[in-house]
Amino acid sequence: MAFLKRSPWILHYDASSCNGCDIEVLACLTPLYDVERFGIINTGNPKHADILLITGGINSQNREVVKNIYEQMPEPKVVIAVGVCAASGGIFRECYNIAGGVDKVIPVDVYVPGCAARPEMIIDGVVKALEILEEKREKMTGATQIKESARQAAGEST
Amino acid sequence: MTWTWLIGAILFLILAPIVGGLIAGIDRIITARMQGRVGPPLLQPFYDVGKLFEKERAVVTTAQNFYVLAYLIFIAVSGALFFAGGDLLLIIFAFTLAHVFLVLGAYAVHSPYSHIGAERELIQLMAYEPMIILAAVGLYMVTNSFLVADIATATVPAILYLPGVFLGFATILTIKLRKSPFDISTSHHAHQEIVKGITTEFSGSTLAQVEIAHWYENVFLLGFVFLFFAWNPVIGIVAVVVTYLAEIFIDNVTARVRWQAALKSGWLAAVLGIANLAILSYMMLGGV
């Protein structure tokens, strides 16, 4: 069953963005866009989240925070980098404290371009991410099945 | 009385998660419409719980799983006793014990967010516990029985004797349904303060169990509301629906209060209940 695609819960983290993309992310929750139509909920808790929506180019202070949040999210999970800063560091790329993109710290699955990214594009990015999420889930259940059967085989042999 | 009680209990155990999930779905749609949104599909709560069972089992300490399972079981037991027509006092004690297990589950981990949620859940317990017992006492005074089976079949219109108790119960119902202004320990909405309160450290299937327990709990509480109107089942069902719609409305028009205000409101509701019972006992002693 694919419940995951129907109920993606999002965690939004601002990794030194200028706040432009963050406002657009929150605009997705407003009555005009209403992402709850797709079962999307904005949680504040990494342990409940399926999708990490991250804005900004990550500075040296929140590098560890981003890693920590990512590791706390239970599998399967996907990361969406929203805005050009999250993709490459954008206008802040040359700054001494900017890592230059989310993918320098954690693996990113979907990049949403724009400065700031429009709500339609963010929703589009989330829909793209749902396909990847579903792939990861199938891979995960496949891996656990293989592990289970291997364990059973080992149990029988001993 | 031979086997009918068992049928009530089994029907509750099977149907309550379905009914509770549907109520949650309707709740979310109505809430969305009140906010000018379209809202999620009706079956969204089932998708959410199904999803949670698909996720990785990330457990901080194994003790928390045990406590959450105990929470689910005791909520189901108290609801099953209720629909089996059991003793209202026993049901309330089982119900309280269930929440104690939830609090212990939140305390089992070292997260400060989880601890704050657990503390607030304890405050909520303190706030609603007097009123819920007064509701049972009030129903006893009117029907002369603590057995749900007797109260539900009584021909006395309990609501006419217990308007204050019912209003008090409606107040604490807001706490129990985890709705604003009293959703201080955790909330259904996309709020973010104090991470997610008592459920912060529960994820995957453990969180799904908390959610299913909440469905059981809601059906049980709406059953409790029905007892006030049990002399006429049609009025009873209408009253349950109206009460729940009023709760959704209050949820959407109020902001969350501080825990002090939640505690005071719960106890003020209890004072209202006590005043009602005092007047009732005065009348029953032949004062009028």
Image (cartoon, coloured by chain):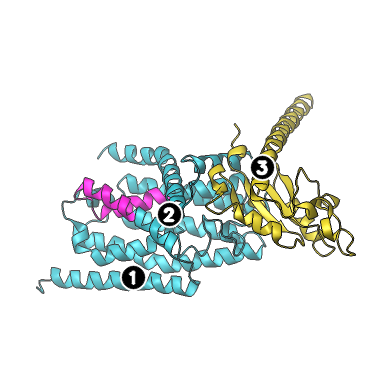
Q: Amino acid at mark 1?
A: Ala
Q: Residue at x 48, y 46 (%)?
A: B38
**In the image, are marks 1 and 2 on the same chain?**
yes
Q: Amino acid at mark 2?
A: Met
| Magenta highlight on residue B236 | yes
Q: Which mark is residue A124?
A: 3
Rounded to the nearest angstrom, the CA distance separating label 2 from label 3 is: 26 Å
B97 shown above or below B203: below
Of the 4 image quadrants, the one containing the N terminus of chain B is top left
- Dot 3 lies on which element? helix
Read off the residue under disc 1: B270
Residue B274 percent location from the top left of the image: 28, 72
B210 shown above or below A147: below
Q: Main secondary structure of the magenta part?
A: helix
A110 shown above or below A68: above
What is the tally of numbered marks visible in this picture?
A: 3
Chain-order first, disc 1 or disc 2: 2
Q: Residues within 10 Å of mark 1 (few under 14, many from 20)?
A: many
User: Which chain is represented by cyan in the image?
Assistant: B
Q: For residue B50, which quarter of the picture?
A: top right
